[in-house]
Amino acid sequence: MRVLGIDPGLTRCGVGVVDVAADRTASLVHVGVVRSPVDADPGDRLATIARGIRQVLDAHAPEVVAVERVFAQHNVASVMGTAQASGVALMLAAERGLPTATHTPSEVKAAITGYGSAEKAQVQHMVARVLRLAVLPKPADAADALAIALCHAWRSGTAPDTAGAGGGQTPAQRAWAEAEKRSRVARTYVRTPR
């Protein structure tokens, strides 16, 4: 499966494309950052982000687009720009009939490192290790985009565990799968108020 991962942002929008095989191994196809000038009109900035994402879609033909889910922060202006860039990415995928998914930062960190509160440097190191890169992907937005793509491929079940009992998964993937299982069990036993 070829996945385009997007770390949305109005100033810097990370884009990363990976190919993931059935045995969960992955290879780098493309990584980069689409930048827009901070002093430009917001509409022009979004158009710049859209052009950059379109170029990646045209050049690499992903089968699915995964975007980091926007979450609340104290900086409202930052959240707004991130949400706008996220909307552009999702719209461009929908225009091409591509399936989309969103993943929270903690989901992505758990999938890549086995720990939902991992630091950015840990994510960069694990992405480089998984993709067998000689150098860490930089800036962090680019590494995050690759992590989002990997998270989606592993989470979607595209690469089933054929070895049984987690044998076909990395330790980080097994930890993430266990956390997901515990989360589902916990939700099952939560009683809803009447």
Image (cartoon, rainbow, N blue to C red):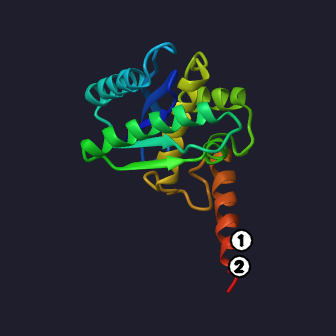
In this view, 167 is above or below 28: below
Please name the residue shown 50% across and 13% down the image.
39
Q: Quadrant of residue 63?
A: top left
Residue depicted at 37% across the width and 21% down the height: 44
> What amino acid is found at the position of numbered circle 2 in the picture?
Tyr
Left or right: residue 86 versus residue 140 is left
State the SS at label 1: helix
Q: Which residue is mark 1?
A: 186
Amino acid identity at mark 1: Ala
- Could you say where residue 173 lies in the image, as x and y percent from the top left? 62, 48
Helix, strand or loop at label 2? It is loop
Residue 5 higher or lower than 175, as above or below: above
Mark drawn on residue 88: none
Instruction: Measure how far apart labels 2 and 1 are at the Cα level.
Output: 5 Å
Residue 105 point in image, percent of width and height: 63, 42
Q: Is residue 3 among what the camera can see?
A: no
> Which mark is drawn over residue 189?
2
Task: Give how far across and how far down residue 14 sits, in percent.
Answer: 50, 26
Residue 178 position (above or below residue 128): below
Report if the CB atoms under discs 2 and 1 are less than 8 Å apart.
Answer: yes
Q: In this image, 41 relative to 186: left or right? A: left
Quadrant of res 31: top left
